[in-house]
Amino acid sequence: MATNDQILLARAHLASARNVTILTGAGISADSGVPTFRGADGLWRNFRAEDIATPEAFERNPRLVWEWYNWRRELIATKQPNPAHDALVKLEQQWADRMWLITQNVDGLHCAAGSQRLSEIHGNIWKVRCTSCGVISENREIPLPILPTCPLCHALLRPHIVWFGESLREEDLRRCNQVIRSCDLLLVIGTSGVVYPAAGFASAAKDIGALVIEINLDSTPKSNLVDLSLQGRAKDLVPLLL
Ligand code: OAD
């Protein structure tokens, strides 16, 4: 568990930072009851990503993929932002254009809490994208009809999610590069740090001399690289830092 001294040190670092970038992963939403991917009850323990989270899987069996996303939408719809999400909104209000939040989460809980200076680099489960005309729209229907179609061109809609084997959107990549290069403090919350490009952000920030602080329930492959690793629940630790 993080000690008081570690928390005080992290607070001091944050207080003296000029530009802060925050990277979050499934661990921040775990405290809201959203399952992580690689934990003991993680989604990838029970489902094969190759069957439901790749463009090939969608081409092969869009029905199965939509059933899975409908199940996840039903589950996430019952969840609320927790004190860690709320604390990051306060940080944004205080820091304005000196902070940016990058999340790998697709659950929309940062948006629901009120975060605006935010890149959802893996997409958003409440958005759909047309496989033909590419139009992205918000859609909160639960369940979505299996094999939903585009209201404009009637082609098949897909979840607006970045699947394995797909690249981040240009605009998100550009923004990530910019906020990682310009920060002097990177706060990494609740991610296992194994999925790229986000898994490379901590070392990229270190390369330009930024300080990196990690908050995670456990140690991660990045714990030895970061300047300060705080172990504990995001919902307890994040509000203490801010
Ligand atoms: P993971 O499931 O890989 O990792 C979750 C991390 O959160 C682990 O390191 C846990 O130790 C930590 N954790 C769990 N509960 C926590 C809590 N209450 N407080 C703090 N930390 C906690 O999830 P991600 O790293 O987000 O991609 O996974 C990255 C990507 O892999 C996801 O965005 C997803 C997945 O495939 C897509 O869906 C495209």
Image (cartoon, rainbow, N blue to C red):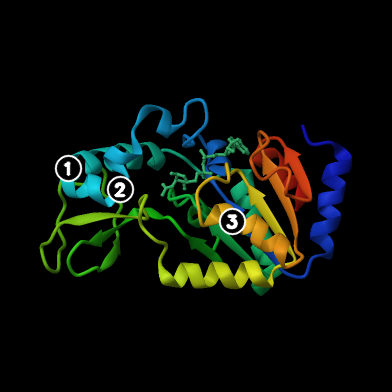
Is residue 149 or residue 104 the one in the foreground? 104
Q: How many marks?
A: 3
User: Is the CB atom of the residue marked by disc 3 within 8 angstroms of ligand 1's nearest atom?
Assistant: no
The structure residue drawn at horizontal position 23% and vertical position 38%, both measured from the top left corner, is: 67
- The amino acid at mark 2 is Thr
Label located before the other in sequence (1 or 3): 1
Element at badge 2?
loop
Q: Which mark is residue 54?
A: 2
Is residue 209 or residue 103 the one in the foreground? 209
- The image quarter containing residue 192 is top right
The structure residue drawn at horizontal position 82% and vertical position 61%, both measured from the top left corner, is: 15
Label located before the other in sequence (1 or 2): 2
Label located before the other in sequence (3 or 2): 2
Instruction: Work out how far the residue at label 1 is from the one at label 2, CA to CA, in angstroms.
Output: 11 Å
Q: Which mark is residue 197?
A: none
Which residue position is annotated with label 3?
200
- The amino acid at mark 1 is Asn
Q: Is residue 109 above or below residue 151?
A: above
Which residue position is annotated with label 1?
61
Asked whether residue 21 is in view, the answer is no
Picture coordinates of residue 87, whole percent (x, y): 66, 52
Picture coordinates of residue 32, whole percent (x, y): 53, 38
In this picture, residue 241 sits left or right of residue 149: right
The structure residue drawn at horizontal position 79% and vertical position 65%, both measured from the top left corner, is: 17
Q: Is residue 167 above or below residue 108?
A: below
- The image quarter containing residue 177 is bottom right
User: Is the CB atom of the residue marked by disc 2 within 8 angstroms of ligand 1's nearest atom?
Assistant: no
Element at badge 3?
helix
Instruction: Work out how far the residue at label 3 is from the one at label 2, CA to CA, in angstroms.
Output: 21 Å
Farthest-out residue, left = 154
